[in-house]
Every structure is written in structure tokens, then in C-alpha cells.
Amino acid sequence: MASLPKRIIKETERLVSDPVPGITAEPHEDNLRYFQVTIEGPQQSPYENGVFNLELFLPDDYPMEAPKVRFLTKIYHPNIDKLGRICLDVLKTNWSPALQIRTVLLSVQALLASPNPNDPLANDVAEDWIKDEEGAIKTAREWTEAYASKKDQKSTN
Amino acid sequence: MSKVPRNFRLLEELEKGEKGLGPESCSYGLADSDDITMTNWNGTILGPPHSNHENRIYSVSIECGPNYPDEPPKIKFVSKVNVPCVDSTTGEVKSSVFHTLRDWKRAYTMETLLLDLRKEMATPANKKLPQPKEGATF
Amino acid sequence: MKVKLREVHSVFAWTWHIPKESQDAHAETIDDNDGDDVCGICRASYNATCPGCKFPGDGCPLVVGECNHNFHVHCIYRWLDTATSRGLCPMCRQTFQLKKGLAINDSQISKFQELRNKQWQTRQQEFGDQQDPETNPLEDQDDPMMDQGLIVR
């Protein structure tokens, strides 16, 4: 396997030595560009008390190309689809090589705190969100409880 | 080149399939659009011209296991077809016989598999084999 | 006393000369590089190489942006050559331009102009005949490539 660029090694070391509060990211032993990620739901959001599993991959062209990120835990959010794909500008058109794994994951966490139903990916969820925000937030809470509760994760992992 | 992990590889294939960026002679998509593991897929193969398969559309089901693409997927015809590499009772494509499954490489995709099957149906030895009634299923 | 000098070893230290006002005051928030400024793209020191080079120095030079953000020339060039970049500086998202009148940038000017011409032409093709002189990056340059760009249109 081609050697890992220094930048990726540095980023990985810093993720471990100086972790972002509420976020963990660990590379898989057999593929150092492939990370297992957890993000805690932000407080005062419908995802509060949830821990969400994600996966992140640094493509060959990283940092010229954005990391690829996907939710593995089911989540009810207008910008995240059924397969866990995320609609977030910094992962697509607004990527910059000055961003890093940690800043990208912070943006994902921020997206949980402020859903944006006007720029949707999961269309039906976004529609619900616009029509009945209160109801949508309730569903998001229920899903968090059902799929992302801390207790469950400990017993299944 | 670094190894693209299974899930991101399948997402790439899904996107290509969804956008119709692949060839017209085959198509594929998730069997269950809710399945976060992206294991089961449906595919179609357009029967190759100048053969007994001409103008037929064959449905297949594909299963990408946890070790895909290091290991080949399982593929099974839903539409009845008479080709030596396909089990005549179950519709399964026999991995011991069909070269693309037997000599599977990580770079191969579901599209590779569908196109190679189509080529197999069009070989001189196979193209004039008698075919079951159109629309029959395994 | 007579001294016979048999051999002399000279050792030199060097750094890129970046004018004071172009030194990035807030570049050091990201890394722990012993106070050494790092390239915002590859995160290696200015005085070291980009990931693709082995030997620092003239083979892997530094460029200074109009916005006072500095990069290894290979790093910023690769970025500007992507469609995602839209010609913007990775740090401040302003159009990236080489700072004028700096010795360090001189040898790179033509290379960057070619790249911008190429992108200008691609953008022209994408947007058809829609014309927006405000975004024309070639406005104040006299370059033979510009004429070709006009012919394409």
C-alpha cells in the first residue's frame, strides 16, 4: 500500500491526543484512510443524548478532494437520507483543503444542531419538517431514543 | 491507490446506477432503499442482439456480502434463462463456471458483472441455445 | 606560525524570504510545528517540501498570495486545478492571485496565468455565451491566450 501522507498521519495523531469534545474518530487497522466515527447529539437538539455512528474515508486525492462521510446510525434529519448520506456544503461544493477531518466532523455536529429543511436531501423528511416542525422534532427524538441511545450501543458493540 | 471501503464503493456504484451514467444495456439499483447495509440489489440485462435473447429483459438479484468487493457478490437470475453458467433449477450464476466470478478482482463492479453476463449470453456457443418462454421466472 | 588549510566545510541555513506584511499572522492555529509556519494545504513547513517532492528549495518553491496566504507552489497549483476550487484561496476563499512585485513569485507567474486561462475557458463552455465581465479574471492582463479564449467563444 502507498505510504500515508504526512498530513493524514498528523491529523490522526491529533484526533487521538486532542480529541474534539463529543466526537471520536479512529482509523481502522487495516485501512488507515478509513475511520470509525461517533458524534454525540448536540444538547438542546432533538438528537440530544444520542450517540451516532458514522464512517469516514479519505480518498486518494484528499485534501484536494473532501472526505467521504456517512451516518451508520438511522437518523431522522432533513439533510440526511435513508442511507445516511449527508447534504452538507463543505463535503461537496464548499470543500477547501484548509479544512480537516475535525472541522468536517464539527460541521456535521453543527448540522444536527441546526437542520436546514430548505436545502433537503431526504425529501419526505424535509417536507414533514416544513409542514409540522413540532411533529418532526418529536419523531427525530423518538428515532434518537430508538436507534442512537447510549445504552443500546454499549450492549451491541 | 488506496482501498475504497465496501460502503463507499457501493455508494459510488449506487450513484452511477441512479444517475444512469452506465451503459444502456444493463441497470442496477438497491432492492430496499432503506437498507443501510446496501446488501441486496436488483439488476437487469438487456438481451444481446443477434441472439435468442434479443429484445428480452432479464431480471437478476445481486447480494453484496460484508466482504464485497474483496469477494464477488452472489448473483441469481430471476427471469428464466438457459445459459450453461446459470443453474437451471435455482437461477444462480455458478461461480465455479463463470469466469468473472471465479477470477474476481477488487476493481470489478456490479456493472462489470452484468456486462460480462450479457457477453456470455452472446457467445457463439450460447447465442442460439433454446430459451424458455419469455416472462418465466425461477 | 604557519597554518595550512587543507579543507573547508561550509554550512548554510536558509529560509524562504517572505516579506513581513505577507506573513500569515494567524497561520499557526492548526499545527504544532515548533513555531514554523506551515503550508495550509499539506501542513508541512514552508521550508520543507510538498508531499510530492523530495528536496526542499528551488525544486519545491513557495508562493505568496495577494491575500497574504502562502503555499507550496505544487500544493496550491493542484488545488486551483480542481473544479471545486473555483480559483479560490483555501484559507480565505478570495480569488487566489500571486502577489505582484515579489521575487519569490516571479518564476511562477506564467504558470498561474495559463491555469487561469484554462479555467476561464472551461467556465465559458459551461455557461455558454452568458457574459459576466466582472468575473473575467483576464481583464487586466495582456496575454496571447486571451485571444484564443475569445475565439472559442
Image: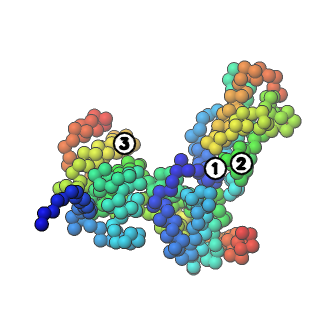
The disc labelled 2 sits on which kind of residue? Cys
Quadrant that contains the C terminus of chain B: top right
Q: Of all residues shown, which one is farthest toward the left?
A: C1
Looking at the rendered structure, the kind of residue marked 1 is Leu
- Give the foreground label among 3 and 1: 1
Horizontal side of residue B64 vs C118, given as left or right: right
Q: Please report, as a chain letter, where disc 2 is located.
A: B
In the orientation shown, which residue stands out farthest toward the bottom?
A: A44
Q: Looking at the image, is mark 1 or mark 2 earlier in the sequence? A: 1
Whether residue C89 is visible: no
User: Circle 3 sits on which residue?
Assistant: C122
Q: Which quarter of the figure has residue C27?
A: bottom left
Q: Please identify the quarter of the rendering in which residue C92 is found.
A: bottom left
- Point out residue B9 in the picture as x, y percentages from the top left corner: 61, 49
Relative placement, left or right, of B117 versus A129 is right
Q: Nearer the viewer, residue C55 or A4?
A: C55
| Three-letter amino acid code at the position of disc 3 | Thr
Asked whether the residues under the numbered discs 1 and 2 touch, taking CB atoms below 8 Å apart as contact, a structural biologist would say yes
Left or right, residue C50 beside residue A146: left
| A143 or B104: nearer the viewer | B104
Does the rendering let one see residue B76? yes
Image colouring: rainbow
Report helix, strand or loop for mark 1: helix
On the image, numbered disc 2 is attached to which residue?
Answer: B64
Residue A53 lies, in percent from the top left, at: 63, 66
The residue beneath circle 1 is B10
Q: Residues within 10 Å of mark 2 (few under 14, many from 20)?
A: many
Of labels 2 and 3, the one closer to you: 2
Q: Are marks 3 and 1 in one subunit?
A: no
Q: Secondary structure at mark 3?
A: helix
